[in-house]
Image (cartoon, rainbow, N blue to C red):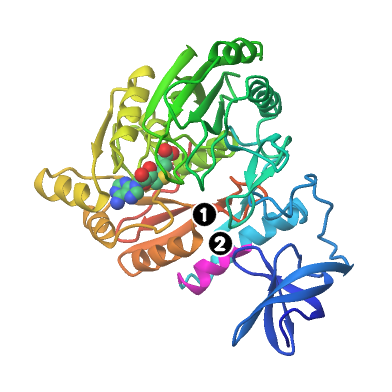
Amino acid sequence: MNKNETYEITIEDFTKDGEGVGHIEGMAVFVKDTVPGDVAVIKIIKLKKNYAYGRLMEVITPSRYRVEPVCDKARQCGGCIFQHVSYERQLEFKLKHVRDCLKRIGGIENADELITGICGMDEPYHYRNKAQFPVGRDKEGKVITGFYAGHSHNIIDTEKCFIQAKVNEEILACVRKYIEDYNITTYSEEEHKGLVRHVLTRVGFTTGEIMVCLVINGKKLPHSEVLVERLKGIEGMTSICLNVNTEKTNKILGNECITLWGEDYITDYLGDVKFRISPLSFYQVNPVQTEKLYGKALEYAGLTGSETVWDVYCGIGTISLFLAKKAKHVHGVEIVPEAIEDAELNSSINDITNTTFYVGKAEEVLPREYEKNGIHADVIVVDPPRKGCDIKALETIIKMEPKRIVYVSCDPATLARDVKWLSENGYELKCGEAYDQFCFSGHVETVVQLVNIGVKPDYTVRL
Ligand code: SAH
């Protein structure tokens, strides 16, 4: 095999990241934008000792799972990776990935039975409630907004995105016109010059409230009153603000927000729990699927009202507040102090009084509260970041001997690693389900229930 030469290949499978993989001369070749079953012409773009990367040049015989992307920017844009794959096949890929990780890494032989299925969306489009569009200019000086190309910071001009809220089209058209009309400068990363960096939008899917926040490399936006006047005309507009980011950084948001008009937050609901969301707050981006996922976590928690529950890695307390309505008390632990402030605020606006939140590392707070302050747990929910749970946190969790552990995970590989450890330390994986929170991306969420096998589990407890 030679670099820059073209070959015919039959795509056999997906990699864990959703690239197609086939073989040429016995060597594995990874090809983005292909689907198992495709027969295609590819060009070798990178050749390593044991594997190679190819670029799709032409599909000769399409896989039966191949579909026409709804978005004409699909191949360039670094956002979606599965626009060319039928939704059913995406779900099949994600479910298999979860089950395979649990089998291979977790040693759970019957993972196919235990992980009962994947919950997809009826309508996998326009599901995101938050978007951050970089702003720039093309070679002719025309204002462009969109998304970055894969592995780069080149802006792909996108007027229409099929996974974002539809109202963003109107918002972006309005912001672009304002920038053109008043000749406002746009930010250039290389030169660290220019004013407007990003447009952040948030939409409360339940309330219909909308926030628009312009991230600027400065403190003042010229003629902002015109922008405000124009944006106010969009139905649902509740909050228009600026975020100041004058740093030379690829972090999108700075720490300071200036409200130009309206409130400095929007509100939204997950189930019947109300959340107040500011530009800097973390909030789940797919509220429809989050509600289903957390509903399942609650079911797996099996609460009767008398339990002390820990929500470890609690963020703004989304799961904690769901649980609090059915538990005696919920303790939440989170490393980011602002998230805990939000969690406390969200508790109080919902009149929830049976929660306590702790700022700190799970691996420090849990041992401290358990060993020094004797706080116990009937049920522990964990929702860690991609790297999974810290071993110290897991060690304390098993010492606390909760009857059930509910593990919400955004990375099947680390979930499987932690499930293996927990299985070796008195807990048995009883059931689980995968959730498609990020349709058209390669990500998958999973929730599983583990039961303390020293204690007789009570399966009659269901909501
Ligand atoms: N359930 C939460 C989101 C959890 S995401 C919600 O819905 O809001 C994982 C969270 O773990 C993040 O908020 C992150 O800040 C936090 N985190 C990361 N490392 C941590 C650690 N060592 N201890 C406690 N929290 C941590």
Q: Which amino acid does label 1 sit on?
A: Gly
Return the x and y of residue 399 as percentages of the image width and height.
21, 57
Residue sitting at x 67%, y 20%: 181
Number of numbered discs on residues:
2
4 or 127: which is nearer to us? Answer: 4
Tell me, yes or no, whether the highlighted magenta stretch contains residue 433.
no
Instruction: State the SS at label 1.
Output: strand
Image quadrant of ligand 1?
top left
Query: Residue 98: which disc?
Result: 2
Which kind of residue does numbered mark 2 sit on?
Val
The reply to whether dot 1 and dot 2 touch (C-beta < 8 Å) is yes
Can residue 99 be found in the magenta stretch?
yes
Of the pair 424 and 457, the residue shown nearer to us: 424
First in sequence: mark 1 or mark 2?
2
Residue 148: x %, y % from top left: 61, 48
Crowd band around label 2 with a 10 angstrom C-alpha radius: few (<14), some (14–19), many (20+): many
Using the rendered image of the protein, determine whether residue 301 is visible from the camera's viewpoint.
Answer: no
- Which of the 4 image quarters holds residue 140? top right
Q: In this view, does 363 lie to the left or right of 457?
A: left
Q: Residue at x 48, y 14 (%)?
A: 260
Q: What element carries label 2?
A: helix
Please identify the dominant SS of the magenta region. helix
In the image, taking residue 122 as reference, residue 338 lies left or right, namely left
Question: In the rendered view, would you say 302 is above or below 352?
Answer: below
Where does label 1 land, which residue? 432
Task: Choose between 420 and 429: the one closer to the eye.
Answer: 420
**Residue range (magenta):** 96-106
Left or right relative to 392: residue 114? right
Percent from the top left, x then y, of residue 42?
A: 79, 73
Residue in the image at 23% along x and 38% along y: 358
